Amino acid sequence: MSQNEPGFNELLAAAKHSAVHLEMRDSYGVGDEAEDYEHWKRTSQRDVDPGSAYWAPWVDLIRGTVARGVVVRRARVVSEPVTDYIRYEHAGTVVNLHAGEQVRWLPRRQASDIALPGNDCWLFDGEIALFNHFSGDGNWSEPGWEVRSEPAVAHMASAAFEAVWERGIPHEKYSV
């Protein structure tokens, strides 16, 4: 990754029509949510206040993006029974929806015949893929992301996302 390579915020700001996110891990360990996750594990209570310090930057970013006419969708492929982390994610998804995202869940056993990319990714306008790189424990690894714009890579990421989305269960109907 070059220092001139755009990051997530720049790519989302440049999106004109769509931004889709494909998540495929059963557990993440990224530092910026560690405190919230630990609180949830102790109390079973998740911060779901869209105006909280934890959520407000994301909610503002997504609301602004959706207001520009960009459709933001997130699809999660998960193992069942789900991990504690997925329960935590599920509990907070109401805020993603409040911000304007559409979210679906696909049990992993229903994804066996879908060709999936090797990493979680965002795809912007079907043309630019941002692949997230995580270490084995779920934290960001170096480099944290990789941007790819080759048509074949974008097509692969788009086909994978759309296949997961088509089979996915809307958040409101998916129980953990």
Image (cartoon, helix red, strand yellow):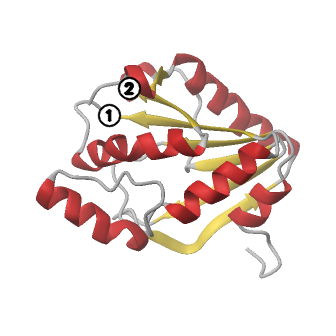
Q: Position of residue 135 (x, y in %)?
A: 43, 66
Q: Residue at x 52, y 38 (%)?
A: 97
Q: Is residue 155 left or right of residue 143?
A: right
Q: Amino acid at mark 2?
A: Pro
Q: Position of residue 107 (x, y in %)?
A: 38, 26
The quarter of the picture where residue 165 lies is top right
Q: Is residue 149 left or right of residue 78?
A: right
Q: Is residue 109 left or right of residue 96?
A: left
Q: Residue at x 75, y 56 (%)?
A: 12
Q: Residue at x 66, y 58 (%)?
A: 61
Q: Position of residue 86 (x, y in %)?
A: 31, 44
Q: Give me the disc on residue 99.
A: none
Q: Amino acid at mark 1?
A: Ser
31 over 172 or under it: above or below: below
Q: Give me the disc on residue 107.
A: 2
Disc 2 to disc 1: CB gap under 8 Å: yes
Q: Give me the disc on residue 79.
A: 1
Q: Quick one: SS at disc 1? A: loop
